[in-house]
Amino acid sequence: MRSSPCFLLGCIGLAFAGLPAGAQGLPSLPSGLAPVLLEEFIEVKPDGMFTYARFRFVAPEIGQSGAQDYEALVEDFMMLCQDYAVPRLVGNPEHIDRVIISYADRALEFGVSDADATQYFEQFTLQNDICIWEQF
């Protein structure tokens, strides 16, 4: 379970949720997708080790037949981290250790799984306002 849903970015994110990509200030992505921001929030892990900034997007196209595969979306994640998430985190009073960018083909409640949903996640370490991909 995450901390307060409006902790820092949560309330800001709700103001943008459901708007077209251009209205959210999203960069044009290499894949050509125009995802919609579902939510963004800060999450302090229960063990206190890392603080995460999560940016969750809906891109229905990823769940459709003939959709681009994950490899075609990799550059999107880096761009969303560096060109979208990092500027939104500048001046944040909370030290952010990791940024998580996720795509889902439908809006899902955070933490709820759906076997029919297509979802992709990428994690980045944030150092000096630079996103460093954490390859698993």
Image (tube, rainbow, N blue to C red):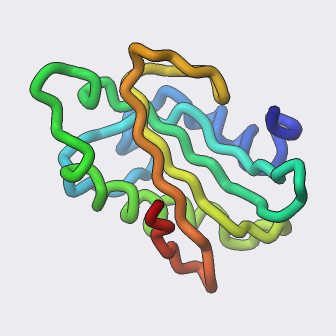
Query: Residue sitting at 39 percent across and 56 percent down?
Result: 77
Query: Residue sitting at 53 percent across and 79 percent down?
Result: 130
Horizontally, residue 42 falls left or right of residue 38, namely right
Vertical arrangement, residue 93 with respect to residue 7, above or below: below
Which image quadrant is residue 22 in?
Answer: top left
Quadrant (top left, top right, bottom left, bottom right) of the N terminus: top right
Horizontally, residue 6 falls left or right of residue 20, namely right
Q: Residue 40, position in %: x, y?
A: 63, 43
Residue at the left extreme, as displayed: 66
Vertical arrangement, residue 125 with respect to residue 48, above or below: below
Vertical arrangement, residue 120 with respect to residue 84, above or below: above
Q: How many marks?
A: 0
Query: Residue sitting at 88 percent across and 48 percent down?
Result: 46
Query: Residue sitting at 51 percent across and 73 percent down?
Result: 131
Q: Residue 56, position in %: x, y?
A: 53, 39
Q: Nearer the viewer, residue 51 or 42?
A: 51
Vertical arrangement, residue 45 with respect to residue 18, above or below: below
Q: Residue 25, position in %: x, y?
A: 44, 51
Q: Nearer the viewer, residue 51 or 14?
A: 51
Which image quadrant is residue 87 in?
Answer: bottom right
Horizontally, residue 118 falls left or right of residue 7, namely left
Residue at the front extreme, as displayed: 136
Q: Nearer the viewer, residue 46 or 104?
A: 46
Q: Residue 68, position in %: x, y?
A: 16, 39
